[in-house]
């Protein structure tokens, strides 16, 4: 009896992904593993240490460092990493913002010290009910003193340089010094 085929654990899969996949896509995958609880930061650190001397070891550690498991979708992860690669300060994913009603909102990406937030609007945000909730949320964040920029998939993939310029300008207007 041969038994079940060998399986690779989630931390090893994350390491292979970090080594072989495009870093932006790799972070999206690893963020998903972290978010789902399939792997944790400790397991990633152990895997990175165990494989530090292998080819790709430094790259895997670097990709693990870009991952946070807080993004709610791969495009949010991709956006965060691409903004960092474009020279912007690293945003905080899902930063809590208390609004006047006492409700706590969590913008997709935020630079809390500048009160600038970025919301990624995927296709499901085009639904009328979702749009109603999104606009109410936007108004609450603006009332709390936040500047909120919205990013669509089209902008992420086809207008990224312009998007970076807009976010950079918003951060500079709010006090960031590159």
Image (cartoon, rainbow, N blue to C red):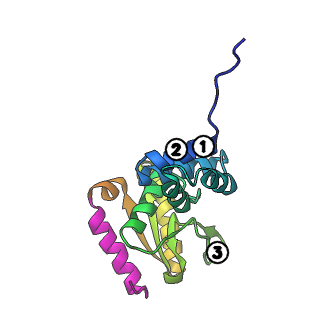
Report the magenta residues as a range: 159-178
* Residue found at x 43% / y 50%: 25
| Residue bearing mark 2 | 16
The span from disc 3 to disc 1 (Cα, nearest Å) is 45 Å
Q: Dot 2, how many residues are within 10 Å of its Cα: few (below 14), some (14-19), or many (20+)?
A: some
Residue 119 percent coordinates (x, y)? 46, 64
What secondary structure is found at the residue carrying circle 2? helix
- Of tags 3 and 1, which is closer to the observer? 1
Residue 31 shows which numbered tag?
none
Residue nearest the viewer, comparing 98 with 64: 64
Q: Dot 3, how many residues are within 10 Å of its Cα: few (below 14), some (14-19), or many (20+)?
A: few
First-in-chain label (3 vs 2)? 2
The span from disc 1 to disc 2 (Cα, nearest Å) is 6 Å
What secondary structure is found at the residue carrying circle 3? loop
Q: Taking 130 as reference, is 102 left or right?
A: right
Residue 37 percent coordinates (x, y)? 67, 48
Q: How many marks?
A: 3
* Mark 3–mark 1 CB contact (< 8 Å): no
Magenta stretch encompasses residue 172: yes
First-in-chain label (3 vs 1)? 1
Residue 101 shows which numbered tag?
3
For the C terminus, give its image quadrant: bottom left
* Mark 3–mark 2 CB contact (< 8 Å): no
- Of tags 3 and 2, which is closer to the observer? 2
* Residue found at x 67% / y 53%: 46
Which of the 4 image quarters holds residue 24?
Answer: bottom left
* Residue found at x 35% / y 68%: 86
* Residue found at x 68% / y 51%: 43
Residue 12 shows which numbered tag?
1
């Amino acid at each position: 009896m041969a038994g079940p085929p060998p399986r690779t654990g989630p931390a090893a899969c994350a390491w292979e992904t970090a080594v072989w996949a495009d870093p932006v896509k790799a972070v999206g995958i690893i963020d998903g593993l972290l978010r789902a609880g399939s792997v944790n930061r400790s397991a990633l650190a152990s895997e990175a240490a165990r494989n530090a001397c292998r080819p790709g070891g430094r790259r895997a550690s670097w990709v693990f460092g870009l991952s946070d498991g807080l993004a709610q979708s791969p495009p949010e992860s991709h956006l965060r990493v691409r903004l960092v690669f474009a020279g912007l300060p690293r945003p905080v994913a899902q930063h809590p913002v208390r609004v006047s009603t006492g409700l706590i909102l969590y913008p997709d990406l935020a630079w809390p010290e500048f009160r600038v937030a970025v919301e990624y609007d995927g296709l499901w945000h085009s639904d009328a009910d979702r749009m109603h909730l999104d606009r109410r949320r936007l108004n609450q964040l603006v009332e709390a003193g936040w500047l909120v920029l919205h990013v669509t998939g089209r902008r992420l993939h086809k207008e990224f340089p312009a998007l970076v310029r807009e976010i950079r300008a918003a951060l500079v207007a709010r006090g960031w010094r590159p």
